[in-house]
Image: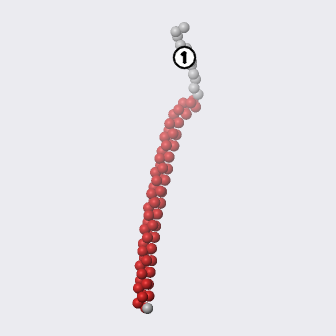
Amino acid sequence: MGESIKPVVETSGWVDVITVVLPIVILMIIGVIIVAIIYIVKIVKRYLANTKIAEKKLKMEEIDIQEIKQRLDRIEKKLK
């Protein structure tokens, strides 16, 4: 009664193949996810940089417009 009976389990070749291939597939998926995240971060950084450049350009244009308005006001005062 003290002896335990060990069941004999036969596995097909597919089980062995899946056990070998599954970790590789998981690592590949993780790698693809990491590459995608890096790419998305680069795109977001570029977008933010372009946004900052556009804001600076807009501010410069506003300053130029103000200067032109001041010049026009001075010219109008001289003409009157």
Crowding near the residue tagged with mark 1, few <14, some 14–19, many ≥20 C-alpha atoms within 10 Å: few
Q: Quadrant of residue 77?
A: bottom left
The disc labelled 1 sits on which kind of residue? Answer: Lys
**Position of 42 relative to 71 (above/below):** above
> Closer to the camera, 68 or 18?
68
**Position of 63 relative to 38 (above/below):** below
SS for callout 1 = loop
Where is residue 12 shown, x and y percent of the image?
58, 28
Task: Kindly identify the residue that appears in the image at 48 percent across and 50 percent down.
Answer: 37
Task: Kindly identify the residue that appears in the image at 48 percent across and 45 percent down.
Answer: 31
**Position of 12 relative to 26 (above/below):** above
Q: Disc count in the image?
A: 1
Where is residue 46 shown, x and y percent of the image?
45, 59
Q: Which residue is under mark 1?
A: 6
Q: Quadrant of residue 53?
A: bottom left
Where is residue 80 shown, x and y percent of the image?
43, 91
